[in-house]
Image (cartoon, rainbow, N blue to C red):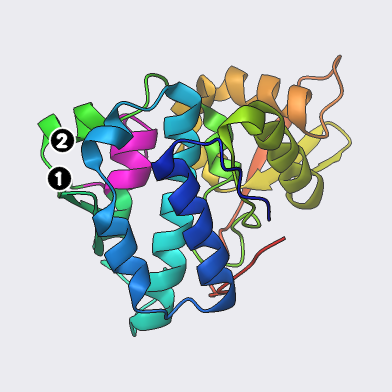
Amino acid sequence: MTVRGSLPRPERRVLELLERVRDDATHPDIEDELTALSAARIADLDEDEKRAFWLNAYNVAVQHLLAVRSDSPSDAGFFDATVGVGETTLSLNDIEHGVLRRRRPSELAYDPVASRRVLTRLEVERLDPRIHFALNCGARSCPTIVPYESPQLDDRLDDATERYLAAEADYEDGMVVVPELFEWFEADFGGPDGVVEFLRTYGPVPEDVTPGVEYRDWDWRTIPRKFR
């Protein structure tokens, strides 16, 4: 994992924390280091810097919480667990649904912990559906954790998406079977037609085929520290 000295401090520090949780997710300094970051500096990051920061921060927070708590992603309330990031308190759901997804509706319940004002200040400018193949919630069906750095963010997200779909999406005889996240977040991909187009771009669906789509149940069994 390469940490680039030229990156803005919040992005650089969260990459260092990602290295730390890879080695020891129970390390007591992880929460202190997240809290020590400046929310104002995070809010001032440009779009790629901000998205890279929050992808890494989410993966850091999940891995740490999995290591120090007794519950897991399959338990009600796990994603309402909170971490301090800068001077703010955010739930895991706030980071995913409030900051990275900009509070867009989905089939998953989301009750914000942070205020709308705080989320608006920290959120990215646009929703990028490729985040779903970068965020690891600790479950078996989640993508592998990799570090995200703003200078290569677009290529890294393309690669993460293609790798995940190569392993998890199956196409045969006009039918594609994909993980349940496509059903939960169908609107993020532009609706049913957008899901198919996304699978043509990044997955196994041929260009000239409009397939039927089936959704595979999410495997919520826990696999902590699933790094590449």
Give the residues in magenta: 94-110
Q: Position of residue 76 (x, y in %)?
A: 29, 68
Q: Is residue 111 visible?
A: yes
Task: Tell me: 72 left or right of 84.
Answer: right
115 to 154, vertically: above or below: below
Under mark 2, the amino acid is Val
Residue placed under numbered mark 2 in the picture: 118
Crowdedness near tag 1: few (<14), some (14–19) or many (≥20) residues, C-alpha within 10 Å: some
Whether residue 98 appears in magenta in the rendering, the answer is: yes
Farthest-out residue, bottom: 70
Q: Which residue extends farthest top?
A: 208
| SS of the residue under disc 1 | loop
User: Measured along the vertical axis of the image, is residue 6 above or below residue 55?
Assistant: above
- Residue nearest the observer in this picture, 210 or 128: 128
Q: Which amino acid, by three-letter code, is at mark 1?
A: Ala
Can residue 220 be seen here? The reply is: no
Kindly identify which numbered label has been placed on residue 114: 1
Q: Is residue 158 left or right of 124 when viewed as pictured?
A: right
Task: Confirm whether the magenta stretch covers residue 61.
Answer: no
